[in-house]
Amino acid sequence: MSASSAPKPGETPASILRNFCIIAHIDHGKSTLADRMLQLTGVVDARAARAQYLDRMDIERERGITIKSQAVRMPWTVTEEAAGLHDIDAGPGTYVLNMIDTPGHVDFTYEVSRSLEACEAAVLLVDAAQGIEAQTLANLYLAMAADLHIIPVLNKIDLPSANPEKYAAELAGLVGCEPEDVLRVSAKSGVGVEELLNEIVKQTPPPVGEKDNPARALIFDSVYDTYRGVITYVRVIDGELTHRDRIRMMSTNATHELLELGVISPEAVKSDKIGVGEVGYVITGVKDVRQSRVGDTITTQHHGATESLGGYKHPNPMVYSGLYPLDGDQFGDLREALEKLQLNDAALTYEPETSGALGFGFRCGFLGLLHMEITRDRLEREFNLDLISTAPNVVYDVIMEDGTEIEVTNPSEFPDGKVHEIREPVVRATILSPSDYIGTIMELCQTKRGTLLGMDYLSEDRVEMRYTLPMGDIVFDFFDQLKSRTKGYASLDYERKGDQAADLVKVDILLQGEPVDAFSAIVHRDASYNYGVMMASKLKELIPRQQFEVPIQAAIGARVIARENIRAIRKDVLAKCYGGDISRKRKLLEKQKEGKKRMKMVGRVEVPQEAFVAALSTSGGGTDPKK
């Protein structure tokens, strides 16, 4: 049916509204299923259709992953035959579906948790060839915590390697239903998607809200548009929002005029008002990104609500990294870019910091390594910046002998003096894998100082392992090693679980006896020697030879644990000495030696920018998006 014949926004009774989201592990077909729904409901015609229609960013399309949740309004007509077949209480007729397509990667869980607040049901999608994976479980638990109705669906049933009977039984056991209640679809070919839409109408409860109460709408997302300012996505809980209303943000008490409002279907469609249970967008012309906070409640300025809706629990950053502009003059541009990007990505945190080697920059907090990589990519592409990012690290608590406690987010902040104890953050990791790889996973987790909490068999050949692991050991190459050891079959999810005391040391890298703060790192004592040797040999290759010999040393405090020498460039002073006495040659060599010694006293080692970029690059940091 055409989108134009659907009920208009603001005039849609709550009884025909259905708000739902699609949740799944990465690469299980969420965006493809969303494409089929857009085509079947007629909001995207065949000419405009393209794969992953709702993935708007270039970076999403290149990597084949969803980074931003996208909301879309779709009309769906239930025929008399379908109403009888699916036992739909409200009967045949046209319904309005508000769908939110969510990311699947562990680093974007915060996007998913916010989307769930705007819905009454969640379609839990599982690949019929791969089965339940770690992020499937994580997203399912998020949906259950938000008290959503779960609709279990198996996707990709037409693949030669699909095993729908086996995984339907697994999924039914997880959700608590019968295997025959698990719907089977092929999002690529469209098989079973019509039945799924009818089941969504049947199983999703209509939204509950008071039409006559003062307006209250929850901000669940926002984006920054260069021309129009902040575009805020809202779910109306009570009352209605009307064009040209004066609205008030309840957390800041800032008031604005509603210049435009409407729904996304899947392009923006203007409307005069949006009512109870509807999902839409509002534009106030505000350019200050701090005035539209995700989780805030919007109400009207006059006769508005007095009690705000429950907001969101703000996520704690898991990984910290420094972002510095290659050109120091771009520092102001980087600050502005981070402000605008934070509106797009509420989980990003940042604060200014300086480095002796890299100049002025920002210390940024991310939810994981992929989140860090995507953020840097977006800053470089969308804001035309050239950036260096330092190696990722986590926050440590250092307790001194006198009892003072210092929070260290950067190795350069590590205090001098006697340290009583260092505490590091730990995570509770859930690893799902075929049972053939239990031994190799255990070996990997033990080398990363992990503690096994428990192990359960989900089926005869799939196992769930739970470990406590230090966060600092996960942020480098844990994902890569897990993938390579299990031939890509294992999946991982983790959450922060407090901290623990550990034997950690600060390793300094010295050039000619002078520490270079950008290369320092906080590592476990057992791994300190390997880190020192690795950095010294890396810098030996990267730093050009000088006129004098340059020692590169790795040290813990005053004790040197590794050393490499960059040999001096020598001029052949003996070229003009042919024949003659050896004492003449010796005299010339001694004179050169004296000159080198004098040069070493006044000369400084210039570390080229490329050496910083290469030595601090986060390549090999385990950011495989298919994890």
Image (tube, rainbow, N blue to C red):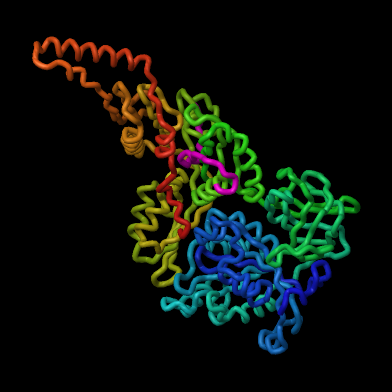
| Residue 562 percent across, percent down from the top left | 30, 31
Please indicate, yes or no, whether residue 589 appears anywhere in the rendered image. Answer: yes
In the picture, measured across the screen, residue 549 lies left or right of residue 402, that is left
Q: Residue at x 67, y 68 (%)?
A: 99
| Residue 402 percent across, percent down from the top left | 52, 24
State whether residue 166 is above or below residue 386: below
Q: Residue at x 32, y 25 (%)?
A: 546
Asked if the magenta segment contains residue 503, the reply would be: no
Q: Tell me which corner region of the image, top left, top right, bottom left or bottom right, holds residue 385.
A: top right
| Residue 535 percent across, percent down from the top left | 35, 36
Q: Residue at x 65, y 60 (%)?
A: 115
| Residue 481 percent across, percent down from the top left | 37, 53
Please indicate, yes or no, whether residue 172 appears anywhere in the rendered image. Answer: no
Asked whether 8 or 311 is in front, the reply is: 8
User: How many numbered badges does the structure rendering display?
Assistant: 0
Span of residues in magenta: 381-400
Image quadrant where one finds the N terminus: bottom right
Q: Tell me which corner region of the image, top left, top right, bottom left or bottom right, holds residue 221.
A: bottom right
In the picture, measured across the screen, residue 115 lies left or right of residue 283, that is left
In the rendered image, the residue lying farthest to the right is 303
In the picture, measured across the screen, residue 333 lies left or right of residue 298, that is left
Asked if the magenta segment contains residue 395, the reply would be: yes
Asked whether 243 or 170 is in front, the reply is: 243
